[in-house]
Image (cartoon, rainbow, N blue to C red):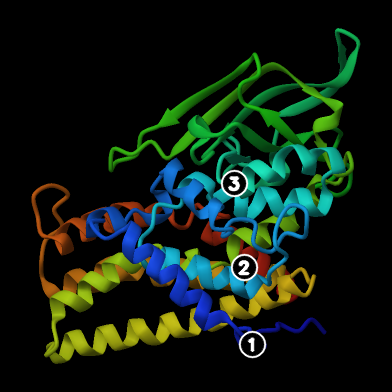
Amino acid sequence: MLLISFEPCELPAGADALRAEVRAFLNEELADFPVPAQARSWGGFDAEFSQKLGQRGWLGMTWPAPFGPGRTALERYVVIEELLAAGAPVAAHWIAERQSGPLLLRFGTDEQRAALLPGIAAGETYFCIGMSEPDSGSDLASIRSRAVPAQVDGEKGWVVNGRKVWTTYAQHSRYMIALLRTGEPGENRHDGTTQFIVDLAAPGVTVQPIRNMIGDEEFNEVTFDDVFVPETMVVGEVGNGWRQVTAELAFERSGPDRFLSAFALLKALVAVAGEKPSDAAAAAIGRLHAHLAILRAMSLSVAAQLDAGAEPVLEAAFVKDLGVNFEKSIPEIAHQVIGASPRIDGGSDFEQALAYVQQACVSFSLRGGTTEIMRGVIARGLGLR
């Protein structure tokens, strides 16, 4: 019988001191950072800010020497929590530090780790993820982008053709870790896939930003036309891509970004409600706070499991699904309680934060897999399908 584990965990000794250090840094760095900008936190791209985090040793914190200080996942959790709670612009380093680096530590070669991890830890080398494809939705088993063995100018490698979509900040990234088809699926639809490190500056790569209704160009479509990828850029084993992607998604689906993406709006709601909120406001804010506390406890539990070397895929899916529902409820509740209309330009801090989150939250369910996919993962994990 499969058991779901969300064992409570305690933050390590020194977590309070680390939290105070990070908070003091953020208070100084973001002293004049407006609330509307805080609402963009996860999507805020600021290379200089990411480099400052790298200089303080707050990127790649859990990585072993010589790539990092080897601190615990829960210490890293404290730093991430403070960054998101403050609305810090973390998008530049986010994917590389959260997913690409840990993936390379686990499945990459010594040469790949030596070449790429120092830049990620310094906040200077940025990655995007190449999983989803046009007309495939979140069904990664249906990917059609293909890599075939080739030799160019005497160098062994692979030639890649196809397209990837919803690649966050590909236009600013140097590399993509792409899931590509290298063989036929066979009886298992997920067989025959492999992960590659693709240099986005290579000939044949075209990055086309996708403008959303807010006016942002966070997502992109990336096209590969006979792109040569050296053999040294294969991640892990050929044909093992699905298992590696599944492990990678546990890092993406369970962190505090799954319930703190709209935190700036929640803080603005509390500020507008004031010290003597109406009964309706007090009840709504109390309910949101209770949901937030439960999600945080679940997310911390997953972080502890990852720190212990486990693969809490099912638990991460629960956090992701529940976190998306929580975040998407915040703008609706905020509007109902306060009665203010969203205004993207010229409104109060609350109205501008409401406008951004109300429009951005429709994409929250796309990041890391749609709601339908998450519930499918959960159903299979529970033996319901």
Quadrant of the rendering where the C terminus is positioned: bottom right
Task: Mark yes or no: residue 4 visible.
Answer: yes
The answer to which of 277 and 187 lies nearer the viewer is: 277
Cα distance between the residues tagged 3 and 1: 30 Å
Instruction: Point out residue 20 in the picture as x, y percentages from the top left corner.
Output: 44, 76
Element carrying mark 2 = helix
Of marks 3 and 1, the one in the foreground: 3
Residue 122's disc number = 3
User: Callout 3: helix, strand or loop?
Assistant: loop
Residue 256 seen in the current view: no
Question: Going from the N terminus, do you reach mark 1 or mark 2 first?
Answer: 1
With 42 as the anchor, is 370 left or right in this view? right
User: Mark 2, residues whose alpha carbon is within 10 Å: few (<14), some, or many (≥20)?
Assistant: many
Name the amino acid type tagged 1: Cys
Please tell me whether mark 1 sits on a helix, a strand or a loop: loop
Residue 265 location, x and y as percent?
27, 66
Residue 293 relative to residue 158: left or right: left
The residue identified by callout 1 is 9
CA–CA distance in space, label 1 to label 2: 19 Å
Q: CA distance from mark 3 to mark 2?
A: 30 Å
Q: Earlier in the sequence, mark 3 or mark 1?
A: 1
Q: Is residue 207 above or below residue 339?
A: above
Disc 2: which residue: 317
